[in-house]
Image (tube, rainbow, N blue to C red):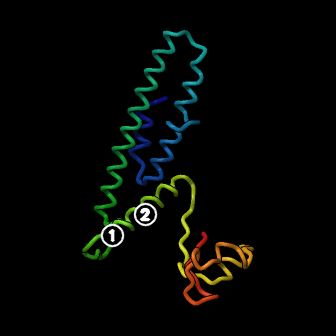
Amino acid sequence: MNLTKIKKEIAAAREAEELEKIRIRYLGRKGLINRQLRKIKNKPIEEKKKLGQRFNRLKVQIERLIGEQKKKVGEIKEIKGEEKPLYELPKYGHLHPITVTENEINAVFKTLGFSVYEGPEIETDEYCFQRLNVPSNHLARDMQDTIYIDEPNWLLRTQG
């Protein structure tokens, strides 16, 4: 594995996507360095130590070079003006604390693989109960459990 070749390859990259492909090619789970590390398992212990240290130093160098190049790519885009909006509104005010909390909770669920669905807060009886096969004598349809706006058609959504 030739470090000068890797350096040239990283320096030639002009997009963040290119750098990510290079990172995966060399440092990914099935990357070149990990494949080489798997090959040294049958070598003597002293040789394993030397090769392991060498590959770890190489990993650190490649990560550092990729990080530096990502910064350069970002600076080049800023100079060209590719990422700056044409006009930016002044920022006044702030979000309500409940909205901030809701956004944080939604972000947590998104990282867990869920999708966030927002729908109307006022629903018809049909969408809230009938299409869910909730019988007309069910306890959830009582006046204490459901807030009807225009009985019997419109109500505040009670079920997700």
Q: CA distance from mark 2 to mark 1?
A: 10 Å
Relative horizontal placement of residue 91, taking residue 146 as reference (left or right): left
Quarter of the figure that contains the C terminus: bottom right
Vertical arrangement, residue 143 with respect to residue 32, above or below:
below
Q: Under tag 2, what secondary structure? A: helix
Q: Quadrant of residue 159?
A: bottom right
Relative horizontal placement of residue 146, taking residue 132 as reference (left or right): left
Q: Residue at x 43, y 52 (%)?
A: 16
Q: Residue at x 46, y 30 (%)?
A: 2
Q: Residue 95 got which mark?
A: 1
Q: Residue 103 got which mark?
A: 2
x and y, in percent, of residue 47 in the image: 50, 12
Question: CB of mark 2 within 8 Å of CB of mark 1?
Answer: yes
Q: Quadrant of residue 135?
A: bottom right
Mark 1 nearby-residue class (10 Å; few <14, some 14–19, many ≥20): few
Which kind of residue does numbered mark 1 sit on? Leu
Along the line of sight, the residue nearer the viewer: 96 or 69: 96
Q: Residue at x 34, y 55 (%)?
A: 74
